[in-house]
Amino acid sequence: MGYIEDHLISGEKIVLMAKRHWIVFAWPVILAFLALLSLANQSIEFGGVFLLLAGIVSVPSFIDYATSEFGITNRRVLVKVGFIRRHSLEMLLTKVEGVSIEQGILGRIFDYGMIVITGAGGTRGTFEKVAVPFEFRRLVQEQVVAAQIDQRYAAG
């Protein structure tokens, strides 16, 4: 079980689980490709260097990909990034003031972006290279509206 599943509260259900986008592996793939080109051209020294660099760069990319979770439940937004140095955000839907997306050209092409979650009291969480950012935002907004409606019915 992951962080989000382990931190659900009573009656809470997961609406969406998102991950880092596969683009975090771009540099290791590029370096591995350069290694293969070098080896194909009989340049064993350059091929070995590129292969070593690809291996070194792939470790933090894999750790980042494997240890990042972005979730929306019927009550909260939960985000956990990192392994040793962990950054987490758990915000009640009733406290979410906005979710903005920043995307560059590659983000538009490959459907990833930076999500900025703003909450009551100035709480702000910024998370880069998140897959399906617009679906994430749409589902947060839908759950915020549902939570507000539930809160109004409970109060009155």
Image (cartoon, rainbow, N blue to C red):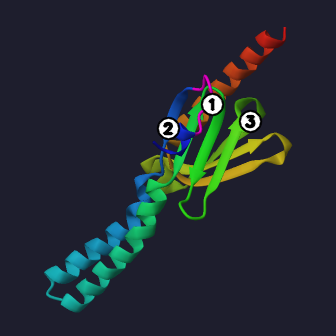
**Percent coordinates x, y for residue 22 in the rendering:** 40, 54
What SS does tag 3 mark?
A: strand
Mark 3 or mark 1: name the one nearer the start of the chain.
1
- Residue at position x 60%, y 64% in the image: 85
Residue under label 3, please give it: 96
- Per the rendering, the mark at residue 17 is 2
**103 up-or-down from 95: above or below:** below
Q: Amino acid at mark 1?
A: Ile
Q: Is residue 9 located in the magenta-colored stretch of the structure?
A: yes
Q: Amino acid at mark 2?
A: Met
Position of 104 with respect to 142 (left or right) is left
**112 up-or-down from 82: above or below:** above
Q: Residues within 10 Å of mark 1 (few under 14, many from 20)?
A: few
Quick one: 2 or 89, which is closer to the camera? 2
**Percent coordinates x, y for residue 135 in the rendering:** 53, 35
Classify the position of the C terminus by image quarter. Answer: top right
Mark 2 or mark 1: name the one nearer the start of the chain.
1
Mark 3 or mark 2: name the one nearer the start of the chain.
2
Q: Which residues are magenta?
A: 7-12
